[in-house]
Image (spheres, coloured by chain):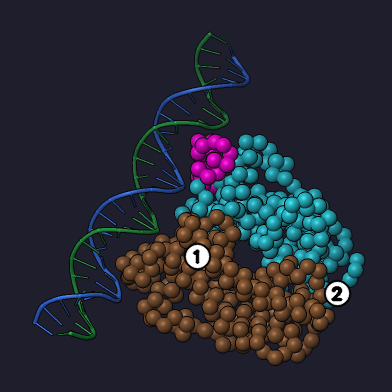
Chain colours: A cyan, B brown, C green, D blue
Amino acid sequence: MTLSVRELVLDNSRADILQAAATCFAERGYAQTSIDDVARRLSATKGRIYHHYPSKADLFADVFRTGMDMNHAAVEPHRRSAGSPLDRWRGMARAHVRQMIETKAFQRAVWEGVEMHLRGATTPEQRDELTRLSAYRDEYGNIFRAVLAEGRAQGVFHFEHIGIANQLALMTLNSPIFWYKPRPRESERDVARIVEQVVVCALRGLGAPEEAE
Amino acid sequence: MTLSVRELVLDNSRADILQAAATCFAERGYAQTSIDDVARRLSATKGRIYHHYPSKADLFADVFRTGMDMNHAAVEPHRRSAGSPLDRWRGMARAHVRQMIETKAFQRAVWEGVEMHLRGATTPEQRDELTRLSAYRDEYGNIFRAVLAEGRAQGVFHFEHIGIANQLALMTLNSPIFWYKPRPRESERDVARIVEQVVVCALRGLGAPEEAE
DNA sequence: TTGACAACATACCCGGTAGTATGTTCATCA
DNA sequence: TGATGAACATACTACCGGGTATGTTGTCAA
């Protein structure tokens, strides 16, 4: 299922910092978030954060990495499953969308990290850390792309350019990080329905056959 | 067709500033862009910019507004056309995607502006300017939503929740501002094919009937 | 019991940037 | 032709925030 931060990050103190940082970065963006903001959210001061992280950029990188780690862990089982490409893609997509919703703060940081990398980010040293993480993210995108290619070869998916198709599909799957807001008294069932609508939309976009499963 | 900045903005000096600002904001983001950056791109100094705009926030707001004005101008004719909801939606979508590609810098500013508004932006005064612009953007989104609703009533589109469907469709149509890069020696025909793939993907996602037009 | 270290808090420095105050140049018009 | 104002450039201030240097507290091991 969906991994929480505390499950993935052993150190409790660091996990708290990561969660607070992810929330701040998601709320205000990297540049607008000061280290003091993160500390304030922890009812602490800079000292605590700089004791664990050498710089703001490193803290952000750790949020980025943690978000991606959680995604990989959630999607990997479905990729390895024995079903058809269509079934595997759907399984991966569902897991991914659920990740976007349930670890939204981290996923927004991932998004902004990729953006920062595409732009010309900061110092040369932090730059290749971002490059590594961005490659990590690309690799993740390629997992979906591979299943997509396999499915097209079998005549399940229909599209013109696989790069564009993959981009569009992933964009759809990612989109909840921008518009999803938990409703008051929202049930697990409600979330599942949202996930399903997103996945169905993406599958249709890929030219997959409609079905009632 | 697609409007250029100089066509829309009468004052030439302001148009140059707007273009430079849009480019800078798109490249680095609002916070990372200093007024000096914009001035440098113009081979000028702060003085020029502050002569025309009272603050950085006002400059950004003008970029935002200009981007939205161009979108409205491009889409409006298709909305008013006499065709079926499906044809109108497709026409609007094509025009929109083309806007995203050809005025990408401005559209990224629009995107960031909406983001900034959803977060808690700056001073109370600049805040309600952003609120106005964000409402302007919502109104634009509702144009698509209205045609979508009309089409669903006629059985052309098929989806569960119209809010989510509209969000997903617009996200697809907007996505080129994130991944589109002009290729060397790219022809008008190439652009048209990209536009078509995006629009087709969005239409499928909405459950519209496939056709070869 | 003490010393050593982890885990912070406090106080301070300093670079970058928004905004301002004050020149300077050039065109226009009375 | 001189005065006036638009359209900038230059020089400066104030502040915010990343980073550092140093102090404080609790814990654990010898």
For the point 73% across and 55% down, the residue is A183
Quarter of the image where one finds residue A131 = bottom right
| Residue A21 against residue C22 in the figure, above or below | above
As shown in the figure, which amino acid type bears the numbered disc 2? Pro
Task: Give the alpha-carbon distance from disc 1 to disc 2, as whole Å.
Answer: 46 Å
Residue under numbered circle 2: A209
Is A55 included in the stretch rendered in magenta? Answer: yes
| Residue A71 against residue B10 in the figure, above or below | above
Q: The C terminus of chain A appears in which quarter of the rendering?
A: bottom right
Where does the magenta region start and end? A35-58
Quarter of the image where one finds residue B2 = bottom right
Left of B87 or right of it: where is B174? left
Q: Is residue A6 visible?
A: yes
Q: Is residue A80 visible?
A: no
Labels 1 and 2 share a subunit = no
Whole-percent x and y of residue A19?
63, 44
Quarter of the image where one finds residue B90 = bottom right
Q: Which one is in front, A49 or A160?
A: A49
As shown in the figure, which amino acid type bears the numbered disc 1? Glu
- Magenta stretch: dominant secondary structure: helix
Q: Which one is in front, A174 or B144?
A: B144
Residue under numbered circle 1: B129
For the point 52% across and 57% down, the residue is B121
Whole-percent x and y of residue D18?
46, 47
For the point 57% across and 79% down, the residue is B71
Give the structural element (helix, strand or loop) at label 2: loop
How many numbered marks are there?
2
Give the structural element (helix, strand or loop) at label 1: helix
Left of A27 or right of it: where is A193? right
Is A60 included in the stretch rendered in magenta? Answer: no
Whole-percent x and y of residue B86?
75, 84
Q: Chain of mark 1?
A: B
